[in-house]
Image: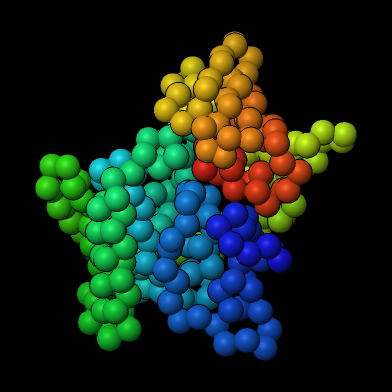
C-alpha cells in the first residue's frame, strides 16, 4: 500500500489504517488530519460503525473549527453537516491558503480534546468550536440537540462512504501520462466559479465546456476539469497521486 502524504484513503484501506483488520488491536481514538471533506465523512462512518471516538478539525484561510464526537452517545458529523459540499464548492488550503497559526490553533484544540477524552473529562456532547484568528474571535456552538434519529449514519446505520468501491474514481488514460478522476456522486461544477477559485494556485484558462489549469505546485501537473466533476490529471500515471491532487484542488 502506498504510504505518505499522497495516500488516497478509501473504504478498501481505511480499516487497515484504523487498526480494524483481523488480528490487530483497533485504535481507541481517531484524530482527523486529513485534507478533504470526503475522507472526513469516511472517518465518520468508521467512527460510528465501530464506536471509536474521533476529533474533527479543519481550517482554511484565517478560520478553523474543531469538534470531538463520541458515538453512540453524541451527534456524528452527518447530524451536523448532513451532506458533503459539491466538488469545487468550497475553498481549500491549496486554493485559498491557510494562516499558519490557524492550523496550529486547530491542532492544539484537537490535541486538548483528545487528552480530555482519554482522561474521561470531555463533556458529552462537546460543543463545536469555531475560530477566526484574524478577528480574534472564538465561538462555541452547542451540539446538545444535534443528534438526529434520521441521520443516515448514526441513526439509520447506513455507511455509504465506507461501503463505496475502492476503485470507483480513477482510470488510466491509455498511452498518456494522465489519469481521469470522477466525482463520487453526480456533480455539477460551476466552471467560472471554479476557475476563479484556482486562479491563486494555477494558471487558468476557461471555456464554456472545461477549465484547464497549470498548477504552480506541483509544477509538472496540469488539470482539465469538466462540468460533471470529472477531471484529467496530466503529468502522472499514479492513481493514488492523481486522487490526492483531485481532492486538493477540485474537491471530493
Seen as rendered, the residue at the extreme right is 175
Q: Is residue 188 visible?
A: no
Give the residue at x 47% y 28%: 198
Q: Is residue 86 left or right of residue 80?
A: right
Above or below, 58 relative to 213: below
Q: Is residue 7 visible?
A: yes
Residue closest to the eye, 239 or 30: 239
Looking at the figure, which quarter contains the N terminus? Answer: bottom right
Residue 13 picture location, percent across and down: 66, 66
Taking the image as shown, residue 252 lies to the left or right of residue 57, namely right
**In x, y percent, where is residue 82?**
43, 49
User: What residue occupies the far front of the structure in this picture?
Assistant: 219
Q: Nearer the viewer, residue 39 or 75?
A: 39
Q: Looking at the image, which residue is at 78% across and 37% down? A: 177
User: Residue at 58% across / 27% down in the picture?
Assistant: 214
Q: Is residue 43 above or below residue 211?
A: below
- Where residue 116 appears, x then y in whole percent? 26, 79
Return the residue found at the far top: 208
Amino acid at each position: 500500500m502506498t504510504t505518505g502524504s499522497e495516500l488516497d484513503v478509501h473504504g478498501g484501506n481505511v480499516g487497515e489504517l484504523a487498526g480494524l483488520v483481523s488480528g490487530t488491536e483497533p485504535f481507541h481514538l481517531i484524530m482527523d488530519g486529513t485534507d478533504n471533506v470526503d475522507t472526513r465523512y469516511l472517518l465518520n462512518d468508521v467512527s460510528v460503525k465501530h464506536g471509536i471516538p474521533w476529533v474533527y478539525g479543519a481550517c482554511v484561510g484565517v478560520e478553523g473549527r474543531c469538534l470531538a464526537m463520541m458515538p453512540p452517545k453524541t451527534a456524528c458529523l452527518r447530524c451536523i453537516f448532513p451532506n458533503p459540499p459539491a466538488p469545487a464548492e468550497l475553498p481549500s488550503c491549496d486554493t485559498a491558503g491557510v494562516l499558519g497559526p490557524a492550523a496550529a490553533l486547530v491542532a492544539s484544540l484537537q490535541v486538548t480534546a483528545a487528552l480530555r477524552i482519554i482522561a474521561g473529562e470531555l463533556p458529552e456532547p462537546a460543543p463545536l468550536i469555531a475560530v477566526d484568528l484574524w478577528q480574534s474571535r472564538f465561538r462555541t456552538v452547542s451540539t446538545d440537540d444535534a443528534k438526529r434519529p434520521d441521520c443516515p449514519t448514526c441513526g439509520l446505520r447506513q455507511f455509504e462512504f465506507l461501503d463505496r468501491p475502492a476503485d470507483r474514481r480513477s482510470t488510466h488514460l491509455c498511452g498518456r501520462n494522465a489519469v481521469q478522476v470522477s466525482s463520487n456522486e453526480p456533480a455539477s461544477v460551476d466552471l467560472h466559479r471554479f476557475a476563479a477559485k484556482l486562479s491563486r494556485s494555477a494558471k487558468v484558462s476557461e471555456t464554456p465546456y472545461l477549465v484547464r489549469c497549470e498548477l504552480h505546485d506541483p509544477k509538472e501537473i496540469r488539470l482539465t476539469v469538466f462540468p460533471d466533476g470529472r477531471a484529467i490529471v496530466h503529468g502522472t500515471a499514479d492513481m493514488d497521486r492523481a486522487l490526492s491532487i483531485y481532492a486538493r484542488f477540485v474537491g471530493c
